[in-house]
Image: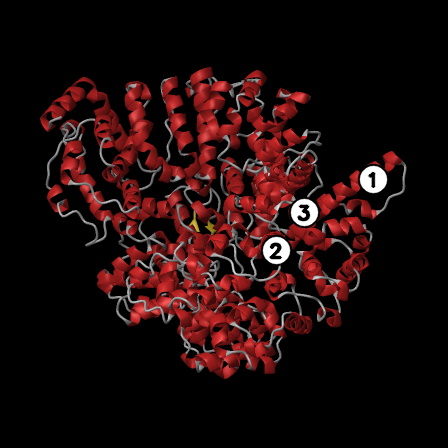
Amino acid sequence: MSSSSTARQIFFIMATKGRPFFFLLIVACEALATPPKELPTNKCDFTDMAQKLMRKCLMKGYPAPMLMQLKTIFNNSDLPMAYRNSKQPDTLLSTFVNVMQSVFPDGANKNPQVNKMTNEMCNFSNLPTMIKLMRNSSVASACYMQAFVAPLSWATLTSQSGNNMTLDDYDTLLWASKPALQGMPLREMNFPTNVGMREHLKKMMAMLREVYSDMSKDQRTEVVKWGKEQITQNYFNCTMTPPSDSKSMPMQCCKPGKLEWLNLDALNMMGPYVSHLAPRDVDSSPKEQLCEYFRSAMFKSTTSMTTDMKPSLGEKFFKKFQECFVGKMFAENVDKLGILACHYSAALDLTPDLSRKLLSELNNCDDGSNPKITQLKKALVKSVMSNASSPEALLRLGSSVNLLSSKQLSEIPDKVLKEFVQNYTVPWKRGQPRTLVQKLLGKECKTVSGKDLIALQSVAEGLPSCVLKHVKEILNDTEGLKNISKRMRKGQLMAMLQGLLQDVVPSELVQKISGPLLLSLPLNKLDKANITSLDQVVDKMWNQAQAAFLAKKMHDQNTLQWRLHSVLQGVTCKMIDKVADNDTQDMVQAISETPQWLSKVQAGCAARKLFATLEKKRADYFKTITEAEMKNIPTYLLLHLPPLKVKDLPDSVCPVFLDKMKEANLSSLPQRSPSRHALTQRALLCLANGKNISELTNEDVSRLGPLLCELQPSQLLFMAPDVFNSSLQAMASCQHIPQRHRADIIQLVTQTFGDPSNWSAETMEALGPLLLLDDNATSALPNKPWMEDVLYFLKLSLKQTSDTLRKKVFSLITTTATSNAARKKRAATSIGNDSKALTVEVIEELGMDNVYWKAAQLDQMSAETFLATLETLGAISGYIPDQLATLNKKATKIFGAVSQMNESVVMQMGCLTQGFSNADLEKLPFSLDALEEIAHCGWNESQMKPVWKGVAKYNNLTVQHLKAEDIVALNQFICGLNSSEIRQLNMTAFKDAVGSVGGVHCSFNVTQQLKSLAVSAFGNPKNWNEAQVSELGNIVAGLNATELASLDPSVFSFLSRSCIPLIPPHNLAALSVAQLVALGPDNTAMVTSEQHTSLRDEQLVALERAVTGQPVAPERAVTSSPAQTQIPAKSGAPSLSVEGISAFMKPLLFLFMGFLLL
């Protein structure tokens, strides 16, 4: 079709139905221009989102669209002058080109015709027509154009009722807006208040279902809230959210608890979002329609993409499912449960066939989230096996094959087992890979072809190291090599590396390997790889030591560029400081593409470099900064802006500042950085903008993003009651709450929401993470029927599980088990004891928490139970001596004396072997390959010596002939070597293995011996660079005071965190102020109280600067103590001090909160 013909068609469409879209487009622009309440006005600008989306196109490698393509799409007339904003660009095309130019880096991939395009005066017609033309373009070109129209399309959809559009145009705009919705912050989603026709609502919900997987939990909750309101308005002519002014109410309120709004249509529209409903919403579903939803298997299919349904909602849906399928019908429909199978807790009475169906449903559940799922799977496997007529039938268990015992696995014919191992990826349990490998390959070491080795990749962890030394033929199978290495232990990886290095040179090897295998490559081999350009390394994953080596090599060769990806972690502050001022912006833009590789120290250095460069352009840069300039500062660097400069930011940049804080990742900022407090206060001032804190809305507070987690309890108290309540609930999702705030936050929670002993499961799900911050509150949690499942659910969101929480879960499980045993005892009128609780099921469910049994309780465990749970008990570290003595007594009764135990038994016992005497430890048949599996058990040095002697004897090892893979396989047990033996280690093998040796924790005496070997290998410590220090790890702790003080300050941020507490206090006291400051926040946080007491005052000040991320002395007016910023609290109330209120004022504040909540 000719361009003139296209133009005529466009003109016709514009003439007939274009006017509504002109109007809608203008309204959309106005909507985008509407500023948050009372904030400085913002122009009609959708370019921020367009830039973000275009960068995604650039990252995918798409080239810029050609001029003729753009002309074809943008050749419509401009908006009428009456509707045009005088500050708006003359044409959409010029705006498009300006946005695209801002995305493309200088000199890279720039379309040579771009400069010409900025001067083209092309026309604009209506948006849907332009989008339809765009959809006919190539994928590469359409990416940038859709990125441009996506935010504009969404604004058009949300600014007015859809009644002004045809279904076809509405559908076109939905398609175009999808990318914007996938990357849009929650605050900017702005769903339409009224979608118009029901068909529009269905189309909108269909599009939202498509982007479900791209949305955050909060966004999904917002979709549910909006969808529920639209359904009630459009189908029931009532509202769930009436306005505060009842006189202006446009429609009547829905009757609470009576409206059955969640009908079949609503369920279909909600799709996967039903997994984010409130349990009470499920009660609003007509029973027959909900049953039809279950029967059609729509529930199963729509929730297939989610695995995080809350226990209270899962339990509610499950009960409804049971009501729909009564008696035998339930068993016959277990294959329709979907995610509800994860909430199945009823007694089992299923046929083997139905058990297999339910087992298939359970395969989508996360076993780690709730051990009850594993117990249910085991029961189902037992049922399935009761009718297994052939080995092949057993293998239909799929990934649940890992629930079979070692004996059952060994009974499967080799041919069937080999085929299964080749075709299925199974998360095998401890010890199973070794059992399977021994069955398929035998116990003797033999040569295995590359093809057979790749076929065994799912059980690679069980392969003996000797098999991995002749694998050259798999070097060309890059993907297979990467996959097999993912499942290997450190000793296996080193064995494979050493085998490959016998056949290929390091330069060839580096190009062909990746993943864990590449990460295991020692520096002395990387040094021989002849790397000369960034292209050879930039797309690979490197560890910190390797990255430091590569960064230094490129820096010394003047070939260092800044799009380094994982090599970024090796860049030093010296390198950053040497960047020329006119190149700083390019550096910042480059590292902004992968900021996750920067440490807190590196991010701080890059930020200081950027800020200093900007202030050379204009001394008062941050006092007079514009919105555009603020946008150009990456958020992760803006976080490091010094407090005084944060305070001086002008009000005019508040919208951009708040947007950046909303998306900020505070993990790049030290937890004690004064900038956290300053940023929080500035954000509050931006939101308040002359108002009192009590006037802030929920929408206002949501704009704080992660800074909400930094608010002081005293500031929360002055918020309006509904905002206060929602803010507390939002804080339950915080990744970090300052320690000094936690006690008061928990007090606010209990005063606001009542005693936790009276909470419902829903309340515990919502606020539990806050309670779990306090050990006393955790211990006091009631033993309610649902508490165990809710705690399992909450543990998924915790970075680490406290000892108190583990004890609480132990108490809940064992109390339930004991109660059940007592009921059975009463029913049988027989005499029982505590051993009733020590069942196989209870021990398997407890997992690592079995460590909390008392020795007397363990002593009552039956021999059958001990034998059935031996591998579970053997995987646990942290036993105390009397527990070990009790368990080992049982072991010797079953297996006989230590001298009678074979390798298989010893490996099943795992950590339990710690309970044997030193004389017995020397007799145990430990294979060298097996040591890595028990290294975590917490051995003391007196035990490691006899274990090493026993291993050396059993495996015919001599210390002089230990190879690199042998040293790595020794793991923690290298600490059992005496000083003479350490000196006899082969130097070449030690150099290759030092990266792994640096990860072990030995006594200071042994570490000193390893340090001496390191000095012989790598030279005088004063010459050690960042890469060497990083690779040496904990060995650095063996340096004496003089040697430690001789290290260059630049290497201290590259010390491993685990190394710091191992340094003797008097040695740490030898460090200079510069060296202590250079430790950085993470390393300084590892300094022990004993080390603190050995430091002088100026050294303590240096540590404080390091831990707060201030390597240079802070400006005089700025301290880490309470800031002086005052924020209006409430009319008639005194101003609120930012750092908090003194202790004697706290009771008054809590009393005041009570009045607010009346």
- Residue 771 position, x and y percent, is 61, 46
Give the answer, above or below, for where 1106 lies relative to 150. below
In this image, 1128 relative to 134: left or right? Answer: right
Q: Earlier in the sequence, mark 3 or mark 1?
A: 3
**Residue drawn at 45 percent across, 66 percent down:** 1080
Place residue 329 in its image quadrant. top right
Dot 1 alpha-carbon crowd within 10 angstroms: few under 14, some 14 to 19, many 20 or more: some
Find residue 762 and name its label: none
- Specify the amino acid type for callout 2: Gln
Find residue 822 and name its label: 1
**Residue drawn at 40 percent across, 43 percent down:** 688
Tell whether label 2 touches label 1 (CB within 8 Å). no
- Specify the amino acid type for callout 1: Ala
- Residue 780 position, x and y percent, is 69, 46
Give the answer, above or below, for where 509 lies relative to 342. below
Look at the numbered disc 2 and give the secondary structure of its residue: helix
**Residue drawn at 12 percent across, 34 percent down:** 122
Look at the numbered disc 3 and give the secondary structure of its residue: loop
Residue 1139 visible, this orientation = no
- Residue 1047 position, x and y percent, is 44, 78
- Residue 116 position, x and y percent, is 10, 44
Q: Earlier in the sequence, mark 1 or mark 2?
A: 2
Disc 1 and disc 2: Cα gap in Å?
44 Å
Find residue 405 and name its label: 3
Residue 1061 visible, this orientation = yes
- Specify the amino acid type for callout 3: Ser
Q: Earlier in the sequence, mark 3 or mark 2?
A: 3
Look at the numbered disc 1 and give the secondary structure of its residue: helix
Q: Nearer the viewer, mark 3 or mark 2?
A: 2
Find residue 438 and name its label: 2
* Quadrant that contains the N terminus: top left
